Structures are given as C-alpha cells and as structure tokens.
Amino acid sequence: MKFLRILGCVLLAGLLLIAFAWACGALYYDGPGSVFAVVNALAIAAAMLFVKRWRMKLAVFAAWFAVVLGWWLTLKPAVEADWQPDVAQLAWAEVKGDEVTLHNVRNCDYRSETDYTPRWETRTVRISKITGIDMAINYWGSPWIAHPIVSFQFADAPPLCFSIETRKKTGQSYSAIGGLYRQFGLIYVVADERDVVRVRTNYRKGEEVYLYRLTIAPEKARERFREYLASLNQLREQPRWYNAITTNCTTAIRSQHPAAERLPWDWRILLNGKGDEMMYERKAIVSGGLPFAELKKQSLINPAALAAGDSPAFSEKIRAGLPGMNVPAPE
C-alpha cells in the first residue's frame, strides 16, 4: 500500500509538472510577452511554496491552470494577415458533379528557395479521371520526422498535389516547440509538382524527397480526393490552428478520413519519418517485390528532379524508372 501511495504521488507530481510546463509555454509563446510568462510562473511557484496544505496547493494550481487553458482556447487563427507570399492565398474548390474547379493552385517560378515569383492558377479536373495516388516523403534532417505530400494522378491532366503546412506570417520561421502552441495557422497548399516537390529537391539545401506509388484503387483514390476538397473548403470558411501533435501534416490526413474507416493507430503516424516503412508493412505502397531498404533507395528522386529542372515533363522525368511507376524515360 505504501508503494502504491508513493507511485501515485510520483505520477501526480509528473502530471503537475507537465501541466505547469505547458501552461508556462502557452503564456510565453501565445501571451503578451516573455516577462508576463516569467512573472506568472514565479507567482504560481511561490504560491505552491507558501501554501501549506497540499489540497489547497492543488486547488490553487488547478484554478491557475484552468484560467490559462480557458484563455488559450479562446485564441482564434487570423483570417487576414501579412502572410508569406507562398501561403498568401487559400485554395478552394467548386464542385459540379464530376467536374472540379480548383482556385489558387500554387505554381511559383523559383530562382532560389527565397527568390521566387508567386503564381496562382485555376485548374479544372474531373474526378472520374483520377487513376491513383502517389506520395512524396520529404526529409530535411532527422530520419524520424518527414513531410508527406499527396499527389493525385489523372488520366488527362497533370498531377495535383496537396501539402498540409503551417501558414506563416512574414518574418515567422517554423519552431517545433512553437508548433505545440497557437503560433501558426493551418493551410492546405494545392500545387503543381514543379512547385511543391521541385522547391524541396532543387532549391532547399539538405532535403531529400522519396516518391512512392500507393496501392489504392482508383475509386478509393477518388474518395480521398473528395475528402481533401471538403477539408480545404471547410478551412476557407473556418480557419484552424496548426499543432505539431494533434493537427499536423500527417494527423490531419488521417482525421479527415471517416473515423470508422481509419487504419489502426501507429506510433509512426507521429514519428512520420517512419511512415513509409509503416505503409510498406501494410502493403499500401507498390514495392515491385523489393525489400523496403532497397525500395527506399530506388525511390529517391532528387537526382532526377535536378536533371529535369523546370521542364514541362518534370512529373514524367522524376518517375522514370521508379518501382511500380512503369513510366518510360522521356526523350
């Protein structure tokens, strides 16, 4: 019994410490300033020190935490702001039966990662012409963290990519810790592959992109496309916050799928750098009979993308020779 009491106290202390750290972070990142956050933290620490009865300590802490959490939940993402040029426009879709007109499809003209001419296009596609889905997995450092880009394939039109990202204001840069708070809006970037893939393979330093073909049937791919359309239109009507754990580039894909049809939860959904390995195990990507390590090695597209440059045949060239793509090398 004594051991259980000690264990309970340790667990409670751990939970309180986590709650304290989160609340201090919320005040620091989303509050009026760092000084305010420090003063708040010192005040609650002093209260815990000088209040004698442990139940009163818990009551004071719970009240403070509830106030911080209640305030934090009232914060709303911006609708209008000085957005960075590459996320200045929100994509949205008009659906008329089989025909879909997508507005604000990004297709920037890049000279370097930071020097580019923003270009926004309107494209019309037919859902019935979707033949499948390819997925690009983008790494920039750690093998445990990656960014997925879903690319819908059409029988009569170029691929159309969806990339779920942070919507940053001018001067903002991504922060992993800041991503746990309400620092960034959520955006569904709809883009040409020569934009959203090529900027990562050809212009950003130290980034690698692997391209896989999914085993999904065309009719299921069309269902996934409709989910993306619904999500980006909802986002246009009701802005949402990005969150590095609950609403990120991977969990947002899963959450837009009907709950009853979602694949079982896996730790690699959060540590998504191992997501391609998970999909391989679940036979969700075309392997060509290769072991995973060899499949991944052959799926790196950086050399092909650099060779393709800004060619109109960029999409065909980066797929030439890839496992499961069955695309001949263009002349």
Image (cartoon, rainbow, N blue to C red):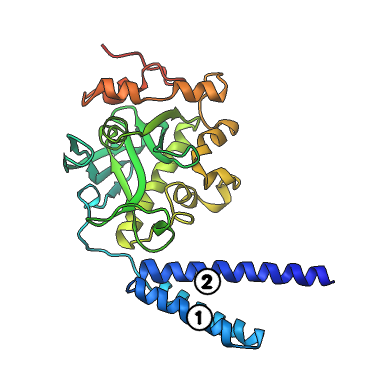
Number of residues whose C-alpha sits closer than 10 Å to that of mark 1, classed few (under 14), some (14–19) or many (20 or more) = some
The image quarter containing residue 317 is top left
The answer to whether residue 9 is visible is yes
Numbered tag placed on residue 323 in the rendering: none
- Please name the residue shown 17% across and 34% down the image: 111
Work out whether 10 lies above or below 323.
below
Three-letter code for the amino acid on which mark 1 is drawn: Ile
- Near-viewer residue (235 or 96): 235
Residue farthest to the right? 1
Left or right, 322 with respect to 304, comes to right
**In whole angstroms, how far apart are the C-alphas of marks 1 and 2?**
9 Å
Q: Position of residue 162 (x, y in %)?
A: 35, 42
SS of the residue under disc 2:
helix
SS of the residue under disc 1:
helix
Left or right, 171 with respect to 278, comes to left
* Residue carrying label 1: 44
- Please name the residue shown 35% across and 57% down the image: 234
- Near-viewer residue (218 or 77): 77
Q: Which quadrant holds the N terminus?
A: bottom right
Q: Which quadrant holds the C terminus?
A: top left
* Residue carrying label 2: 20
- Near-viewer residue (143 or 80): 143
The answer to whether residue 324 is visible is no
